[in-house]
Image (tube, rainbow, N blue to C red):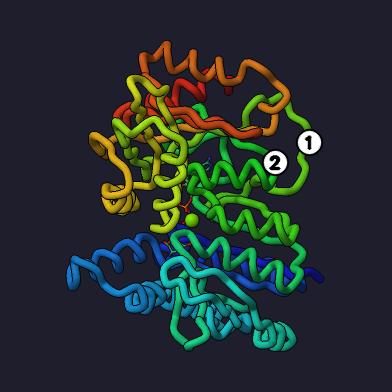
């Protein structure tokens, strides 16, 4: 007998038929004698719809606490409906909200981190041979207020349960049958991967591949939880995410894009020591997460610095720099949010020279201009004009994956 943790995303529980489909997947494993805990997301686009409702009431800024109060309701609906479907199939089942399942988080509403899972309740329900359905994406803070874990956070809920209860496996069911070399809905030639390492998956998720939430991958690596990403809609082998994978003849494992990017340029800074320090120190005080940084060569005693941030932080970055005007001078400040980041990821890059040249050649052939570049051992990202995103993903994918 094994303990199996399964997670079902929004499309997998979108309507009555899908809910019964998921109920049957769960019951099939339960009837083989396994313990089953299923984590579920809100149905279909419920979370987006709830956010839109909040904006109707308070377009400016609903408080993050109340937003969490609202958003957690989406998952409450799906756990209850799924439990009812399992009752209909004559199996013992109980649904639990995040707090009932023991999810204690910090108070960072909207992007809370799990601090601890009190597993007593889940263990007691398993001892009674109940199937457990847990509301994903949510927890409770030390003031007993509801919190959410950030978009796509149900993946993290599932991995956290698998880690806390030492589950035998953690299966992430979604609407595609695994992790692909790029989004299979956008690029028809995308190839399914049999396996991928935690590090590669973490980069892909962070750089825009929606299929797994990046915090869930981080946690899976930390607690050595092997993940399987598979389809809830068709029976087929999925993709395994683990520490080491078989060596495949693949230079890169995937291509991603991220449109949540903007650049901020500070033009005409004095070309003196300490200028970059003061600038980035101020940005750190404003809690701005920087990505790529470019400094021009000094000419005529001045230099320019451009950096990339997420779009929602661009205005804060501008404010931070404007607050420095009395400390040091610059000529002008510019924001550009019509940019995007296209990245390639793969452990094979480390040992193969020429990967960068191959990516740049593909972009050059497609007449796409590169505005900034950033690289690490297993990833290479370029910043380009947003309008070229889809074309860039396609040509870079074609260049590496035949
Ligand atoms: P869920 O609701 O099940 O959590 P998501 O919508 O969050 O599902 O993630 C699944 C989607 O991720 C797929 O429908 C696919 O369009 C997208 N996706 C993006 N990049 C990839 C990739 N490299 N491999 C597989 N799917 C990807
Ligand atoms: N329902 C939440 C969201 O849409 C959490 C999740 O789906 O994982 O982001
Ligand atoms: Mg998701």
Q: Quadrant of the N terminus?
A: bottom right
Give the answer, above or below, for where 89 lies relative to 12.
below
User: What residue sits 49% from the left and 17% below the top?
Assistant: 360
Quarter of image, res 180? top right
Which one is earlier in the sequence, the residue at label 1 or at label 2?
2
Task: Say which residue label 2 marks.
Answer: 195
Give the answer, above or below, for where 108 lies relative to 248.
below
Circle 1 crowding by C-alpha within 10 Å: few under 14, some 14–19, many from 20: few
Toward the top, the furthest residue is 365
On the image, the x and y values in percent for residue 47 come to: 36, 65
The reply, left or right, for residue 193 in relation to residue 210 is: right
Quarter of image, res 402? top right
Instruction: Examine the rendering and report whether any part of residue 82 can be seen.
Output: no
Give the answer, above or below, for where 128 lies relative to 28.
below
Instruction: Examine the rendering and report whether any part of residue 399 can be seen.
Output: yes
- Of helix, strand and loop, which one carries label 1? loop
Task: Say which residue label 1 marks.
Answer: 246
Q: Nearer the viewer, residue 37 or 378?
A: 378
């Amino acid at each position: 007998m094994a303990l199996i943790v399964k997670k079902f995303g929004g499309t997998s529980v979108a309507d009555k038929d899908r809910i019964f489909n998921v109920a049957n997947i769960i019951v099939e494993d339960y009837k083989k004698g396994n313990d089953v805990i299923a984590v579920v997301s809100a149905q279909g686009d419920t979370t987006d719809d709830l956010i839109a409702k909040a904006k109707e009431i308070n377009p400016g800024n609903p408080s993050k606490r109340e937003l969490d109060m609202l958003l957690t309701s989406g998952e409450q609906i799906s756990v209850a409906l799924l439990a009812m479907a399992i009752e209909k199939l004559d199996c013992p089942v109980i649904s639990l909200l995040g707090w009932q399942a023991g999810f204690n988080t910090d108070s960072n509403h909207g992007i809370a981190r799990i601090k601890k899972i009190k597993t007593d309740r889940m263990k007691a329900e398993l001892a009674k041979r109940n199937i457990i359905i847990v509301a994903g994406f949510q927890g409770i803070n030390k003031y007993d207020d509801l919190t959410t874990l950030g978009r796509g956070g149900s993946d993290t809920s599932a991995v956290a349960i698998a880690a806390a209860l030492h589950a035998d496996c953690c299966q992430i069911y979604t609407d595609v049958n695994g992790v692909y070399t790029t989004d299979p809905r956008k690029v028809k030639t995308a190839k399914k991967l049999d396996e991928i390492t935690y590090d590669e998956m973490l980069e892909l998720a962070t750089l825009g591949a929606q299929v797994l939430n990046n915090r869930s991958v981080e946690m899976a690596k930390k607690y050595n939880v092997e993940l399987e990403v598979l389809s809830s809609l068709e029976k087929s082998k999925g993709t395994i995410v683990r520490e080491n994978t078989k060596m495949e003849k693949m230079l890169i494992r995937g291509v991603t894009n991220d449109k949540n990017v903007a650049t901020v340029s500070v033009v005409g800074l004095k070309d003196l020591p300490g200028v970059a320090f003061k600038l980035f120190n101020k940005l750190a005080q404003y809690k701005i997460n920087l990505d790529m940084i470019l400094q021009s060569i000094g000419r005529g005693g001045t230099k320019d610095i451009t950096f990339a941030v997420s779009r929602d932080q661009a205005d804060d970055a501008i404010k931070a720099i404007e607050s420095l005007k009395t400390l040091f001078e610059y000529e002008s400040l510019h924001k550009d949010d019509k940019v995007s980041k296209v990245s390639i990821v793969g452990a094979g890059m480390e040992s193969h020279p020429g990967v960068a040249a191959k990516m740049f050649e593909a972009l050059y052939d497609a007449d796409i201009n590169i505005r900034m570049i950033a690289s690490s051992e297993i990833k290479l990202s370029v910043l380009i004009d947003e309008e070229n995103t889809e074309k860039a993903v396609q040509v870079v994918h074609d260049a590496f994956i035949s």
